[in-house]
Image (spheres, coloured by chain):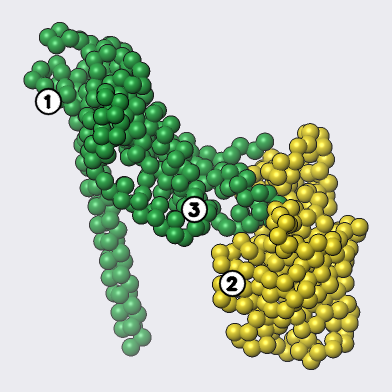
Chain colours: A green, B yellow
Amino acid sequence: MKMKTLAQDNLHHRRRQAVSRLAYLLCALSAVIAMVPLILILAYVVFKGIGALNIDFLTRLPAPVGETGGGMGNAIIGSLMLIGIAAAFGLPLGVLAGVFLAEYRSPRLSWVVRLLSDILSGVPSIIVGVFVYTVLVLTMKRFSALAGGVALAVLMLPTVARTTEEMLRMVPDALREASLALGIPRWRTIVSIVIKTAGGGILTGIMLALARIAGETAPLLFTALSSRTWPRGLDQPVASLPVQIYTYAISPYKDWHQQAWAGSLVLVLMVLILSVGSKLYFGRKIKPAR
Amino acid sequence: MAGSITTNNLSASFGDIRAVEGISIEIPANKVTALIGPSGCGKSTFLRCLNRMHELVPGAHASGEVIWDGKNIYAPEMDATAVRRGIGMVFQKPNPFPLMSVADNVSAGLRLAGVRKNKAAMEEIIERSLRMAALWDEVKNKLGKPGGSLSGGQQQRLCIARALAVEPDVILMDEPCSALDPASTQKIEDTIEELKSDYTIVIVTHNMQQAARVSDFTGFLLTRESGEPGRLVEHGTTSKIFTMPDRKETENYITGRFG
Ligand SMILES: Nc1ncnc2c1ncn2[C@@H]1O[C@H](COP(=O)(O)OP(=O)(O)OP(=O)(O)O)[C@@H](O)[C@H]1O
Ligand SMILES: [Mg+2]
Protein backbone atom coordinates (compact mmCIF):
# COMPACT_ATOMS: atom_id res chain seq x y z
CA MET A 1 0.00 0.00 0.00
CA LYS A 2 2.60 2.42 1.12
CA MET A 3 4.87 1.40 -1.72
CA LYS A 4 2.13 1.98 -4.22
CA THR A 5 1.35 5.51 -3.15
CA LEU A 6 4.99 6.32 -3.20
CA ALA A 7 5.26 4.98 -6.73
CA GLN A 8 2.18 6.95 -7.72
CA ASP A 9 3.56 10.11 -6.20
CA ASN A 10 6.70 9.56 -8.10
CA LEU A 11 4.75 9.18 -11.33
CA HIS A 12 2.75 12.35 -10.68
CA HIS A 13 5.89 14.17 -9.90
CA ARG A 14 7.53 13.07 -13.12
CA ARG A 15 4.49 13.99 -15.14
CA ARG A 16 4.42 17.43 -13.61
CA GLN A 17 8.07 17.88 -14.36
CA ALA A 18 7.56 16.81 -17.95
CA VAL A 19 4.66 19.24 -18.44
CA SER A 20 6.64 22.04 -16.89
CA ARG A 21 9.63 21.31 -19.10
CA LEU A 22 7.41 21.22 -22.19
CA ALA A 23 5.84 24.56 -21.30
CA TYR A 24 9.27 26.04 -20.83
CA LEU A 25 10.43 24.70 -24.18
CA LEU A 26 7.40 26.09 -25.98
CA CYS A 27 7.90 29.52 -24.44
CA ALA A 28 11.57 29.55 -25.27
CA LEU A 29 10.85 28.40 -28.81
CA SER A 30 8.25 31.15 -29.34
CA ALA A 31 10.67 33.72 -28.01
CA VAL A 32 13.33 32.53 -30.44
CA ILE A 33 10.88 32.46 -33.36
CA ALA A 34 9.81 36.00 -32.53
CA MET A 35 13.43 37.08 -32.74
CA VAL A 36 14.00 35.46 -36.12
CA PRO A 37 12.53 38.22 -38.31
CA LEU A 38 14.52 40.84 -36.43
CA ILE A 39 17.75 38.94 -36.84
CA LEU A 40 17.02 38.19 -40.51
CA ILE A 41 16.26 41.84 -41.22
CA LEU A 42 19.40 42.99 -39.45
CA ALA A 43 21.57 40.41 -41.18
CA TYR A 44 20.06 41.14 -44.58
CA VAL A 45 20.41 44.90 -44.23
CA VAL A 46 24.03 44.54 -43.15
CA PHE A 47 24.73 42.10 -45.98
CA LYS A 48 23.21 44.32 -48.66
CA GLY A 49 24.23 47.67 -47.28
CA ILE A 50 27.77 47.24 -46.07
CA GLY A 51 29.18 47.24 -49.61
CA ALA A 52 28.12 50.80 -50.42
CA LEU A 53 28.80 52.15 -46.95
CA ASN A 54 31.91 54.32 -46.88
CA ILE A 55 33.09 57.77 -45.85
CA ASP A 56 31.85 59.34 -49.09
CA PHE A 57 28.42 57.90 -48.50
CA LEU A 58 28.26 59.40 -45.04
CA THR A 59 29.66 62.82 -45.94
CA ARG A 60 28.81 63.58 -49.57
CA LEU A 61 25.79 65.02 -51.31
CA PRO A 62 23.93 62.77 -53.75
CA ALA A 63 25.58 62.64 -57.16
CA PRO A 64 23.60 64.07 -60.08
CA VAL A 65 21.56 61.53 -62.01
CA GLY A 66 23.80 59.51 -64.31
CA GLU A 67 26.97 60.05 -62.32
CA THR A 68 28.22 57.44 -59.92
CA GLY A 69 29.39 58.01 -56.36
CA GLY A 70 27.98 60.61 -54.01
CA GLY A 71 26.30 59.90 -50.71
CA MET A 72 23.50 60.64 -48.31
CA GLY A 73 25.30 63.08 -46.04
CA ASN A 74 22.51 65.62 -46.42
CA ALA A 75 19.85 63.04 -45.62
CA ILE A 76 21.68 61.96 -42.46
CA ILE A 77 22.01 65.57 -41.30
CA GLY A 78 18.42 66.19 -42.39
CA SER A 79 17.12 63.26 -40.38
CA LEU A 80 18.99 64.44 -37.29
CA MET A 81 17.57 67.92 -37.85
CA LEU A 82 14.02 66.60 -38.16
CA ILE A 83 14.43 64.49 -35.01
CA GLY A 84 15.80 67.56 -33.24
CA ILE A 85 12.84 69.70 -34.24
CA ALA A 86 10.44 66.93 -33.27
CA ALA A 87 12.14 66.62 -29.89
CA ALA A 88 12.07 70.37 -29.32
CA PHE A 89 8.29 70.41 -29.74
CA GLY A 90 7.30 66.92 -28.71
CA LEU A 91 9.37 66.33 -25.58
CA PRO A 92 8.35 69.31 -23.42
CA LEU A 93 4.73 68.93 -24.42
CA GLY A 94 4.68 65.16 -24.02
CA VAL A 95 6.53 65.12 -20.69
CA LEU A 96 4.36 67.90 -19.28
CA ALA A 97 1.22 66.09 -20.39
CA GLY A 98 2.51 62.93 -18.70
CA VAL A 99 3.28 64.85 -15.51
CA PHE A 100 -0.20 66.33 -15.60
CA LEU A 101 -1.81 62.91 -16.02
CA ALA A 102 0.19 61.30 -13.23
CA GLU A 103 0.54 64.06 -10.67
CA TYR A 104 -2.44 66.37 -10.94
CA ARG A 105 -5.24 63.93 -10.57
CA SER A 106 -8.03 65.88 -12.15
CA PRO A 107 -10.32 63.05 -13.19
CA ARG A 108 -12.33 64.68 -15.94
CA LEU A 109 -9.56 66.50 -17.77
CA SER A 110 -7.25 63.49 -17.39
CA TRP A 111 -9.88 61.29 -18.95
CA VAL A 112 -10.10 63.60 -21.96
CA VAL A 113 -6.33 63.92 -22.35
CA ARG A 114 -5.87 60.16 -22.05
CA LEU A 115 -8.58 59.49 -24.62
CA LEU A 116 -7.11 62.00 -27.05
CA SER A 117 -3.66 60.55 -26.66
CA ASP A 118 -4.96 57.03 -27.22
CA ILE A 119 -6.75 58.15 -30.37
CA LEU A 120 -3.70 60.05 -31.55
CA SER A 121 -1.46 57.03 -31.08
CA GLY A 122 -3.83 55.06 -33.30
CA VAL A 123 -3.93 57.59 -36.13
CA PRO A 124 -1.90 56.32 -39.12
CA SER A 125 1.20 58.41 -39.58
CA ILE A 126 0.26 59.31 -43.16
CA ILE A 127 -2.87 61.02 -41.85
CA VAL A 128 -0.74 63.06 -39.47
CA GLY A 129 1.35 64.01 -42.51
CA VAL A 130 -1.73 65.14 -44.42
CA PHE A 131 -2.91 67.11 -41.42
CA VAL A 132 0.37 68.96 -41.01
CA TYR A 133 0.40 69.49 -44.77
CA THR A 134 -2.89 71.35 -44.58
CA VAL A 135 -2.02 73.28 -41.48
CA LEU A 136 1.60 74.22 -42.13
CA VAL A 137 2.65 73.49 -45.69
CA LEU A 138 -0.39 75.08 -47.35
CA THR A 139 -0.29 78.16 -45.12
CA MET A 140 3.48 78.62 -45.46
CA LYS A 141 3.16 77.82 -49.14
CA ARG A 142 6.20 75.55 -49.05
CA PHE A 143 7.43 72.21 -47.83
CA SER A 144 9.76 72.68 -44.90
CA ALA A 145 11.92 71.03 -42.27
CA LEU A 146 9.69 72.71 -39.70
CA ALA A 147 6.59 70.99 -41.05
CA GLY A 148 8.40 67.65 -41.08
CA GLY A 149 9.59 68.10 -37.52
CA VAL A 150 6.12 69.09 -36.34
CA ALA A 151 4.59 66.02 -37.98
CA LEU A 152 7.11 63.80 -36.20
CA ALA A 153 6.49 65.66 -32.94
CA VAL A 154 2.77 64.93 -33.20
CA LEU A 155 3.59 61.28 -33.77
CA MET A 156 5.80 61.03 -30.71
CA LEU A 157 3.50 62.97 -28.38
CA PRO A 158 1.27 60.10 -27.21
CA THR A 159 4.19 57.73 -26.62
CA VAL A 160 6.11 60.28 -24.60
CA ALA A 161 3.08 61.35 -22.59
CA ARG A 162 1.97 57.85 -21.71
CA THR A 163 5.45 56.52 -20.90
CA THR A 164 6.08 59.53 -18.69
CA GLU A 165 2.77 58.97 -16.95
CA GLU A 166 3.47 55.28 -16.38
CA MET A 167 6.97 55.87 -15.09
CA LEU A 168 5.77 58.55 -12.68
CA ARG A 169 3.03 56.28 -11.41
CA MET A 170 5.63 53.70 -10.51
CA VAL A 171 7.17 56.13 -8.02
CA PRO A 172 5.71 55.14 -4.64
CA ASP A 173 3.39 57.66 -2.96
CA ALA A 174 5.51 57.28 0.17
CA LEU A 175 8.23 59.34 -1.53
CA ARG A 176 5.82 62.12 -2.48
CA GLU A 177 4.53 62.18 1.09
CA ALA A 178 8.05 62.14 2.51
CA SER A 179 8.87 65.19 0.45
CA LEU A 180 5.65 67.10 1.07
CA ALA A 181 5.88 66.40 4.80
CA LEU A 182 9.24 68.18 4.83
CA GLY A 183 7.52 71.33 3.66
CA ILE A 184 8.86 70.99 0.13
CA PRO A 185 6.42 72.63 -2.30
CA ARG A 186 4.40 70.46 -4.61
CA TRP A 187 6.05 71.51 -7.88
CA ARG A 188 9.49 71.02 -6.32
CA THR A 189 8.48 67.58 -5.10
CA ILE A 190 7.40 66.66 -8.61
CA VAL A 191 10.55 67.98 -10.26
CA SER A 192 13.23 66.99 -7.76
CA ILE A 193 11.83 63.83 -6.24
CA VAL A 194 9.26 62.21 -8.50
CA ILE A 195 10.65 63.02 -11.94
CA LYS A 196 14.20 62.41 -10.75
CA THR A 197 13.31 59.01 -9.38
CA ALA A 198 11.50 58.08 -12.58
CA GLY A 199 14.13 59.79 -14.74
CA GLY A 200 15.83 56.71 -16.17
CA GLY A 201 12.54 55.21 -17.26
CA ILE A 202 11.31 58.45 -18.79
CA LEU A 203 14.54 58.92 -20.72
CA THR A 204 14.39 55.36 -22.01
CA GLY A 205 10.83 56.02 -23.17
CA ILE A 206 11.94 59.24 -24.88
CA MET A 207 14.77 57.46 -26.67
CA LEU A 208 12.43 54.74 -27.87
CA ALA A 209 9.97 57.36 -29.11
CA LEU A 210 12.79 59.11 -30.99
CA ALA A 211 13.94 55.81 -32.45
CA ARG A 212 10.38 55.14 -33.53
CA ILE A 213 9.97 58.41 -35.44
CA ALA A 214 13.46 58.25 -36.96
CA GLY A 215 12.17 55.75 -39.50
CA GLU A 216 8.87 57.45 -40.35
CA THR A 217 8.56 58.03 -44.09
CA ALA A 218 4.97 58.69 -45.06
CA PRO A 219 4.38 61.89 -43.08
CA LEU A 220 7.63 63.37 -44.40
CA LEU A 221 6.50 62.99 -48.02
CA PHE A 222 3.86 65.65 -47.35
CA THR A 223 5.90 67.90 -45.15
CA ALA A 224 9.68 67.94 -45.33
CA LEU A 225 9.60 66.51 -48.86
CA SER A 226 13.19 65.92 -49.97
CA SER A 227 16.18 67.80 -51.21
CA ARG A 228 19.42 67.12 -53.01
CA THR A 229 21.31 69.87 -51.20
CA TRP A 230 22.45 70.37 -47.63
CA PRO A 231 19.68 71.65 -45.33
CA ARG A 232 19.16 75.36 -45.99
CA GLY A 233 16.94 76.32 -43.11
CA LEU A 234 13.86 75.51 -41.12
CA ASP A 235 11.56 76.89 -43.79
CA GLN A 236 13.08 74.90 -46.63
CA PRO A 237 12.50 71.31 -47.75
CA VAL A 238 15.03 68.94 -46.28
CA ALA A 239 16.29 65.48 -47.17
CA SER A 240 15.83 62.63 -44.73
CA LEU A 241 17.10 59.07 -44.64
CA PRO A 242 13.72 57.32 -44.92
CA VAL A 243 12.54 59.44 -47.84
CA GLN A 244 15.89 59.16 -49.57
CA ILE A 245 15.83 55.40 -49.13
CA TYR A 246 12.33 55.32 -50.55
CA THR A 247 13.26 57.45 -53.57
CA TYR A 248 16.37 55.44 -54.33
CA ALA A 249 14.73 52.09 -53.81
CA ILE A 250 11.98 52.72 -56.39
CA SER A 251 14.41 54.19 -58.92
CA PRO A 252 15.56 52.14 -61.91
CA TYR A 253 19.28 52.58 -61.15
CA LYS A 254 21.40 49.80 -59.79
CA ASP A 255 23.82 51.98 -57.79
CA TRP A 256 20.90 53.90 -56.27
CA HIS A 257 19.53 50.57 -55.04
CA GLN A 258 22.86 49.90 -53.39
CA GLN A 259 22.83 53.32 -51.80
CA ALA A 260 19.30 52.69 -50.55
CA TRP A 261 20.59 49.60 -48.77
CA ALA A 262 23.49 51.51 -47.27
CA GLY A 263 21.03 54.21 -46.15
CA SER A 264 18.87 51.53 -44.55
CA LEU A 265 21.89 50.23 -42.70
CA VAL A 266 22.69 53.70 -41.37
CA LEU A 267 19.08 54.22 -40.31
CA VAL A 268 18.93 50.85 -38.55
CA LEU A 269 22.20 51.61 -36.78
CA MET A 270 20.87 55.00 -35.67
CA VAL A 271 17.75 53.40 -34.26
CA LEU A 272 19.76 50.65 -32.58
CA ILE A 273 22.13 53.13 -30.99
CA LEU A 274 19.19 55.14 -29.69
CA SER A 275 17.26 52.23 -28.25
CA VAL A 276 19.96 49.84 -27.10
CA GLY A 277 22.23 52.65 -25.97
CA SER A 278 19.53 54.25 -23.84
CA LYS A 279 18.62 50.88 -22.32
CA LEU A 280 22.21 50.18 -21.37
CA TYR A 281 22.94 53.68 -20.19
CA PHE A 282 19.80 54.58 -18.29
CA GLY A 283 18.92 51.04 -17.28
CA ARG A 284 21.67 50.89 -14.72
CA LYS A 285 22.12 54.56 -14.07
CA ILE A 286 21.78 55.64 -10.47
CA LYS A 287 22.19 59.21 -9.46
CA PRO A 288 25.83 59.47 -8.41
CA ALA A 289 26.32 60.36 -4.79
CA ARG A 290 27.63 63.83 -4.15
CA MET B 1 10.50 76.45 23.54
CA ALA B 2 8.43 74.58 21.00
CA GLY B 3 4.77 75.26 20.28
CA SER B 4 1.73 73.41 21.53
CA ILE B 5 -1.17 72.08 19.48
CA THR B 6 -4.82 72.19 20.42
CA THR B 7 -7.52 70.60 18.31
CA ASN B 8 -11.13 71.69 18.53
CA ASN B 9 -13.81 69.32 17.34
CA LEU B 10 -11.58 67.89 14.63
CA SER B 11 -13.23 65.48 12.21
CA ALA B 12 -11.81 63.81 9.14
CA SER B 13 -13.31 61.80 6.34
CA PHE B 14 -12.37 59.85 3.23
CA GLY B 15 -15.05 60.69 0.70
CA ASP B 16 -18.32 59.91 2.45
CA ILE B 17 -16.71 57.84 5.17
CA ARG B 18 -16.04 59.50 8.52
CA ALA B 19 -12.78 58.18 9.95
CA VAL B 20 -12.51 60.30 13.09
CA GLU B 21 -14.98 62.67 14.69
CA GLY B 22 -15.08 65.44 17.23
CA ILE B 23 -11.57 65.16 18.59
CA SER B 24 -10.57 67.91 21.00
CA ILE B 25 -7.23 67.42 22.64
CA GLU B 26 -4.42 69.53 24.00
CA ILE B 27 -0.92 68.55 23.05
CA PRO B 28 1.45 70.38 25.39
CA ALA B 29 4.71 71.90 24.22
CA ASN B 30 7.99 70.09 24.87
CA LYS B 31 6.23 66.94 25.95
CA VAL B 32 5.71 63.58 24.32
CA THR B 33 2.08 62.72 23.70
CA ALA B 34 1.25 59.14 22.78
CA LEU B 35 -1.85 58.15 20.83
CA ILE B 36 -3.04 54.62 21.39
CA GLY B 37 -6.03 52.61 20.28
CA PRO B 38 -7.02 49.54 18.32
CA SER B 39 -6.24 49.18 14.64
CA GLY B 40 -8.48 51.25 12.39
CA CYS B 41 -9.64 53.67 15.07
CA GLY B 42 -8.18 56.62 13.16
CA LYS B 43 -4.87 57.34 14.87
CA SER B 44 -3.00 57.81 11.60
CA THR B 45 -5.83 59.82 10.11
CA PHE B 46 -5.92 62.13 13.12
CA LEU B 47 -2.14 62.50 13.12
CA ARG B 48 -2.12 63.38 9.43
CA CYS B 49 -4.68 66.11 10.09
CA LEU B 50 -2.19 67.80 12.38
CA ASN B 51 0.14 68.80 9.53
CA ARG B 52 -2.34 68.87 6.67
CA MET B 53 -1.14 65.63 5.13
CA HIS B 54 -4.64 64.16 5.32
CA GLU B 55 -5.94 66.40 2.55
CA LEU B 56 -3.43 64.90 0.09
CA VAL B 57 -5.50 61.74 -0.14
CA PRO B 58 -7.96 62.18 -3.04
CA GLY B 59 -11.43 62.91 -1.69
CA ALA B 60 -10.22 63.35 1.88
CA HIS B 61 -11.51 66.22 3.96
CA ALA B 62 -10.98 67.61 7.45
CA SER B 63 -13.09 70.00 9.50
CA GLY B 64 -12.69 71.63 12.88
CA GLU B 65 -9.70 73.55 14.19
CA VAL B 66 -6.08 72.74 14.78
CA ILE B 67 -4.49 75.58 16.71
CA TRP B 68 -0.73 75.57 16.51
CA ASP B 69 1.18 78.38 18.09
CA GLY B 70 -2.02 80.39 18.38
CA LYS B 71 -3.05 80.02 14.74
CA ASN B 72 -5.55 77.69 13.13
CA ILE B 73 -3.60 75.73 10.51
CA TYR B 74 -6.81 75.26 8.54
CA ALA B 75 -7.48 79.00 8.31
CA PRO B 76 -7.75 80.07 4.65
CA GLU B 77 -4.64 82.24 4.76
CA MET B 78 -2.46 79.41 6.11
CA ASP B 79 -0.15 77.77 3.63
CA ALA B 80 -0.04 73.98 3.89
CA THR B 81 3.63 73.90 2.87
CA ALA B 82 4.58 76.26 5.69
CA VAL B 83 2.53 74.23 8.16
CA ARG B 84 4.34 71.05 7.14
CA ARG B 85 7.69 72.73 7.50
CA GLY B 86 6.83 73.60 11.09
CA ILE B 87 5.17 70.29 11.91
CA GLY B 88 7.34 67.45 10.64
CA MET B 89 6.41 63.83 10.25
CA VAL B 90 8.04 60.41 10.49
CA PHE B 91 6.13 57.63 8.81
CA GLN B 92 5.50 54.06 9.84
CA LYS B 93 7.49 52.62 6.95
CA PRO B 94 10.94 54.19 6.55
CA ASN B 95 10.82 56.23 3.34
CA PRO B 96 14.21 57.81 2.67
CA PHE B 97 14.77 59.08 -0.87
CA PRO B 98 16.35 55.87 -2.10
CA LEU B 99 18.72 57.24 -4.73
CA MET B 100 19.82 60.31 -2.81
CA SER B 101 22.91 60.01 -0.67
CA VAL B 102 22.58 59.87 3.10
CA ALA B 103 23.82 63.45 3.38
CA ASP B 104 21.48 64.69 0.64
CA ASN B 105 18.56 62.96 2.30
CA VAL B 106 19.19 64.95 5.45
CA SER B 107 19.62 68.26 3.66
CA ALA B 108 16.77 67.66 1.18
CA GLY B 109 14.16 69.51 3.21
CA LEU B 110 16.26 72.66 3.29
CA ARG B 111 17.69 72.48 -0.22
CA LEU B 112 14.43 71.69 -1.97
CA ALA B 113 12.49 74.28 -0.04
CA GLY B 114 14.93 76.84 -1.41
CA VAL B 115 16.95 77.50 1.73
CA ARG B 116 20.43 78.60 0.66
CA LYS B 117 23.31 77.68 2.93
CA ASN B 118 27.02 77.51 2.32
CA LYS B 119 28.69 74.12 2.27
CA ALA B 120 30.13 74.27 5.78
CA ALA B 121 26.85 75.37 7.34
CA MET B 122 24.99 72.62 5.50
CA GLU B 123 27.51 70.01 6.60
CA GLU B 124 27.13 71.15 10.16
CA ILE B 125 23.36 70.82 9.98
CA ILE B 126 23.71 67.36 8.47
CA GLU B 127 26.02 66.21 11.24
CA ARG B 128 23.93 67.73 14.00
CA SER B 129 20.71 66.18 12.67
CA LEU B 130 22.32 62.77 12.29
CA ARG B 131 23.75 63.00 15.80
CA MET B 132 20.35 63.90 17.23
CA ALA B 133 18.84 60.90 15.47
CA ALA B 134 21.59 58.69 16.95
CA LEU B 135 22.80 57.72 13.50
CA TRP B 136 25.97 59.76 13.03
CA ASP B 137 28.45 57.17 14.24
CA GLU B 138 27.01 54.51 11.97
CA VAL B 139 26.95 56.57 8.79
CA LYS B 140 29.70 59.15 9.13
CA ASN B 141 31.87 57.15 6.74
CA LYS B 142 29.16 56.55 4.18
CA LEU B 143 27.49 59.92 3.83
CA GLY B 144 27.79 59.56 0.05
CA LYS B 145 26.06 56.17 -0.10
CA PRO B 146 22.45 56.08 -1.27
CA GLY B 147 19.85 56.32 1.50
CA GLY B 148 18.28 53.11 0.28
CA SER B 149 21.44 51.15 1.11
CA LEU B 150 21.03 51.51 4.88
CA SER B 151 19.32 48.92 7.06
CA GLY B 152 15.65 49.39 7.95
CA GLY B 153 16.42 50.74 11.41
CA GLN B 154 19.07 53.07 10.06
CA GLN B 155 16.69 54.25 7.34
CA GLN B 156 14.09 55.14 9.95
CA ARG B 157 16.65 57.12 11.96
CA LEU B 158 17.70 58.77 8.68
CA CYS B 159 14.07 59.81 8.23
CA ILE B 160 14.10 61.26 11.73
CA ALA B 161 17.31 63.15 10.96
CA ARG B 162 15.76 64.38 7.73
CA ALA B 163 12.73 65.66 9.61
CA LEU B 164 14.94 67.33 12.26
CA ALA B 165 17.14 69.10 9.70
CA VAL B 166 14.40 71.53 8.73
CA GLU B 167 14.13 72.48 12.41
CA PRO B 168 10.41 71.96 12.84
CA ASP B 169 8.55 72.85 15.96
CA VAL B 170 6.51 69.70 16.33
CA ILE B 171 7.34 66.17 15.22
CA LEU B 172 4.60 63.65 14.45
CA MET B 173 5.60 59.99 14.47
CA ASP B 174 3.30 57.29 13.17
CA GLU B 175 4.41 53.98 14.65
CA PRO B 176 8.04 54.80 13.94
CA CYS B 177 9.32 51.54 15.41
CA SER B 178 6.82 49.07 14.05
CA ALA B 179 9.19 47.83 11.35
CA LEU B 180 12.23 47.73 13.58
CA ASP B 181 14.14 45.31 15.78
CA PRO B 182 14.44 45.87 19.55
CA ALA B 183 17.90 47.44 19.34
CA SER B 184 16.81 50.02 16.76
CA THR B 185 13.62 50.62 18.72
CA GLN B 186 15.69 51.31 21.81
CA LYS B 187 17.79 53.84 19.91
CA ILE B 188 14.74 55.63 18.60
CA GLU B 189 13.14 55.75 22.04
CA ASP B 190 16.35 57.24 23.42
CA THR B 191 16.27 59.77 20.60
CA ILE B 192 12.70 60.75 21.44
CA GLU B 193 13.72 61.30 25.06
CA GLU B 194 16.53 63.61 23.91
CA LEU B 195 14.37 65.54 21.47
CA LYS B 196 11.79 66.47 24.07
CA SER B 197 13.73 69.50 25.26
CA ASP B 198 13.52 71.13 21.84
CA TYR B 199 10.40 69.72 20.27
CA THR B 200 6.81 68.85 20.87
CA ILE B 201 6.31 65.22 19.93
CA VAL B 202 3.23 63.19 19.10
CA ILE B 203 3.74 59.47 18.66
CA VAL B 204 1.24 56.85 17.54
CA THR B 205 2.07 53.42 18.86
CA HIS B 206 0.55 49.99 19.21
CA ASN B 207 3.00 49.11 21.87
CA MET B 208 1.68 49.84 25.37
CA GLN B 209 5.10 49.51 26.97
CA GLN B 210 6.49 51.96 24.48
CA ALA B 211 3.74 54.46 25.21
CA ALA B 212 4.38 54.05 28.92
CA ARG B 213 8.15 54.40 28.47
CA VAL B 214 8.37 57.41 26.22
CA SER B 215 5.30 59.54 26.73
CA ASP B 216 4.22 62.14 29.25
CA PHE B 217 0.63 62.29 28.05
CA THR B 218 -1.53 59.66 26.43
CA GLY B 219 -4.71 59.85 24.39
CA PHE B 220 -6.89 56.81 23.77
CA LEU B 221 -8.91 56.60 20.55
CA LEU B 222 -11.62 54.06 19.86
CA THR B 223 -14.20 53.09 17.30
CA ARG B 224 -17.11 52.02 19.50
CA GLU B 225 -18.96 50.15 16.79
CA SER B 226 -17.77 49.10 13.37
CA GLY B 227 -18.69 51.70 10.78
CA GLU B 228 -18.60 54.44 13.38
CA PRO B 229 -15.86 57.07 13.27
CA GLY B 230 -13.08 56.89 15.85
CA ARG B 231 -13.37 59.22 18.86
CA LEU B 232 -11.10 60.30 21.66
CA VAL B 233 -12.22 58.32 24.69
CA GLU B 234 -9.95 60.02 27.17
CA HIS B 235 -6.62 61.66 27.55
CA GLY B 236 -4.41 62.68 30.41
CA THR B 237 -0.98 62.10 31.86
CA THR B 238 0.46 58.77 30.90
CA SER B 239 0.75 57.69 34.52
CA LYS B 240 -2.93 58.37 35.09
CA ILE B 241 -4.13 56.68 31.89
CA PHE B 242 -2.04 53.62 32.63
CA THR B 243 -2.79 53.32 36.34
CA MET B 244 -6.26 54.70 36.96
CA PRO B 245 -8.11 55.60 33.79
CA ASP B 246 -11.53 57.19 34.18
CA ARG B 247 -13.17 55.04 31.52
CA LYS B 248 -13.77 51.33 31.57
CA GLU B 249 -12.93 51.08 27.83
CA THR B 250 -9.52 52.55 28.41
CA GLU B 251 -8.81 50.15 31.22
CA ASN B 252 -9.92 47.19 29.12
CA TYR B 253 -7.72 48.24 26.25
CA ILE B 254 -4.68 48.86 28.38
CA THR B 255 -4.99 45.62 30.26
CA GLY B 256 -5.27 43.87 26.92
CA ARG B 257 -8.85 42.69 27.24
CA PHE B 258 -9.66 43.86 23.71
CA GLY B 259 -8.21 45.68 20.72
N1 LIG C 1 -6.93 56.16 2.11
C1 LIG C 1 -8.08 55.79 2.74
N2 LIG C 1 -9.23 55.73 2.06
C2 LIG C 1 -10.37 55.34 2.67
N3 LIG C 1 -10.46 55.02 3.96
C3 LIG C 1 -9.34 55.04 4.69
C4 LIG C 1 -8.08 55.43 4.12
N4 LIG C 1 -7.14 55.36 5.09
C5 LIG C 1 -7.78 54.95 6.19
N5 LIG C 1 -9.10 54.76 5.97
C6 LIG C 1 -10.11 54.34 6.96
O1 LIG C 1 -10.10 55.24 8.01
C7 LIG C 1 -10.19 54.58 9.25
C8 LIG C 1 -9.03 54.96 10.16
O2 LIG C 1 -7.81 54.52 9.56
P1 LIG C 1 -6.40 54.84 10.19
O3 LIG C 1 -5.38 54.42 9.22
O4 LIG C 1 -6.38 56.25 10.63
O5 LIG C 1 -6.40 53.88 11.46
P2 LIG C 1 -5.24 53.61 12.51
O6 LIG C 1 -5.79 53.86 13.83
O7 LIG C 1 -4.02 54.36 12.12
O8 LIG C 1 -5.00 52.06 12.32
P3 LIG C 1 -3.64 51.24 12.47
O9 LIG C 1 -3.38 51.15 13.92
O10 LIG C 1 -3.98 49.90 11.90
O11 LIG C 1 -2.59 51.97 11.73
C9 LIG C 1 -10.21 53.09 8.94
O12 LIG C 1 -11.54 52.65 9.05
C10 LIG C 1 -9.73 53.00 7.54
O13 LIG C 1 -10.40 51.96 6.87
MG1 LIG D 1 -2.06 53.82 11.41
Inspect the image, locate mark 3, and give the three-letter code of the amino acid beneath it.
Answer: Ala
Q: Residue at x 85, y 89 (%)?
A: B246
The image's mark for residue A250 is: 1
Q: Residue at x 83, y 40 (%)?
A: B124
Would you identify the image quadrant in which residue B156 lies? bottom right
Q: Is mark 3 within 8 Å of ligand 1?
A: no
Judged from this view, the residue extending furthest toward the bottom is B248
Q: Position of residue A156 (x, y in %)?
A: 36, 40
Would you identify the image quadrant in which residue B72 lies? bottom right
Q: Chain of mark 1?
A: A
Judged from this view, the residue extending furthest toward the front is A139
The image's mark for residue A102 is: 3
Q: Which residue is mark 2?
A: B14
Inspect the image, locate mark 1, and give the three-letter code of the amino acid beneath it.
Answer: Ile
- Helix, strand or loop at label 3? It is helix
In this rendered view, identify the residue nearer to me: A270 or A235. A235
Query: Crowding near pointer 1: few (<14 within 10 Å), some, many (20+)?
Result: few
Q: Chain of mark 3?
A: A
Mark-to-mark CA distance, 1 and 3: 46 Å
- Helix, strand or loop at label 1? It is loop
Foreground tag (2 vs 1): 2
Query: Split into 4 quadrants, where in the image is the N terminus of chain A?
Result: bottom left
**Residue A44 versus residue B87 in the image, above or below:** above
Q: Residue at x 41, y 49 (%)?
A: A162
Q: Is mark 2 within 8 Å of ligand 1?
A: yes
